[in-house]
Amino acid sequence: MAPPRTAPELSVVVTVVEGGDAVPRFLTALCQQQHAPSMEILVPIDDSVRDLLALAPAFPTVRFLDLGQVSTTRPITSPGGQHELYDRRRAAALAIATGDIVAILEDRGVPRPDWARTVVQLHAQPWAVIGGAIEPAPSGLIEWALYVCDFSRYALPLAAGPAAWVSDVNVTYKRHALESTRALWIDRFHEPAVHWQLVRQGEVLFLTPELVVDHYRTPKPMLVSLAERFHWGRLFGYIRAGELSVGKRLLLGCSWPLVPLVVLSRHARVHARRGDAGRFVAATPAILGFLVAWALGEAIGTVTGRP
């Protein structure tokens, strides 16, 4: 007789980004999954979102990890400091996750009812990293423009198969793959660095349309969103700088003005296929503004090697 199972089939690490009402909306969807496997749900929080502890009685199967004060190199009121909090909280939860499969979701990306069951079914295949689709929830034009910039490559319809990118808004790992990169994320989880290392180790990033979350965004002032784009682009450039020679970094830095138009055309093709051409045209000024802010930040991070 096989020994009784102790570890859950699936651990889900929840990155709190939106906070507030987004968290109970998200947790309700995750706790009410259809035909769900055994799950461990981990919500890492720090002093800046301590009010979320009040949700614990309403969600007794969720483990809220109180990390206390989390130190950051930049003020937590800045976009860079906020992103660092997300990265450090996520790393702390990953370090204690016990599931055979470990997933990362964020509170803005609500999983569809079959999400958890589908994760386990898909991981019967050999892929060590499986990412899913990210669909836009109903929103205003600016919020939709941000969705376009962040997640067009994960928009339905998409073909299942190996991919260059999967998003930490909807990603799952076999435990052995995640553990093999622990040294990279033990303090701060950077999705690109972890995924590039896994690819170097011979793993494949597999993207599937079967695993879907619906992404919600609360409206923010345009200037706040532009600042966020710049700082998050700079963080990506800093991470990428560690993979490149000085010459390649300088070349990419000098070519940044071309990037927004190239990416804009790529997004336009995606949303034309989705039947969103009219909305895309209306949102183009905002999309282009966000792309310029990101590209400039990415160029600075790439050239300087500083986040």
Image: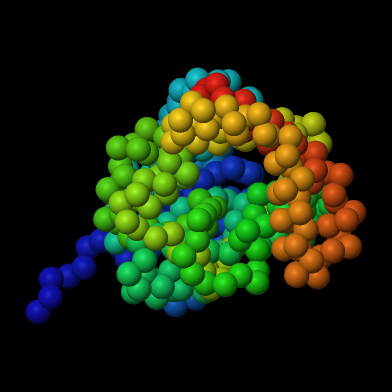
Residue 216 is drawn in which quadrant? bottom right
Q: Residue at x 41, y 47 (%)?
A: 196
Expressed as whole percent of the image width and height from the top left, the position of residue 158 reads 61, 70
Q: Quadrant of the N terminus?
A: bottom left
Q: Residue furthest left?
A: 1
Q: Residue at x 89, y 62 (%)?
A: 278
Considering depth in this image, is 267 or 171 the residue closer to the camera? 267
Expressed as whole percent of the image width and height from the top left, the position of residue 3 reads 13, 71
| Display colour scheme | rainbow
Q: Residue at x 62, y 52 (%)?
A: 108
Considering depth in this image, is 92 or 38 the residue closer to the camera? 92
244 relative to 40, above or below: above
76 relative to 260, above or below: above
Residue 273 is drawn in which quadrant? bottom right
Residue 151 is drawn in which quadrant? bottom right
In this orientation, does residue 105 appear? no
Expressed as whole percent of the image width and height from the top left, the position of residue 302 reads 56, 29
In this orientation, does residue 271 appear? yes
Considering depth in this image, is 293 or 50 the residue closer to the camera? 293
What is the count of numbered marks? 0
Considering depth in this image, is 208 or 21 the residue closer to the camera? 208
Q: Quadrant of the C terminus?
A: top right
Residue 9 left/right relative to 270:
left
Residue 252 left/right relative to 293:
left
Residue 290 left/right relative to 134:
right
Expressed as whole percent of the image width and height from the top left, the position of residue 115 reads 50, 69
Q: Residue at x 71, y 49 (%)?
A: 263
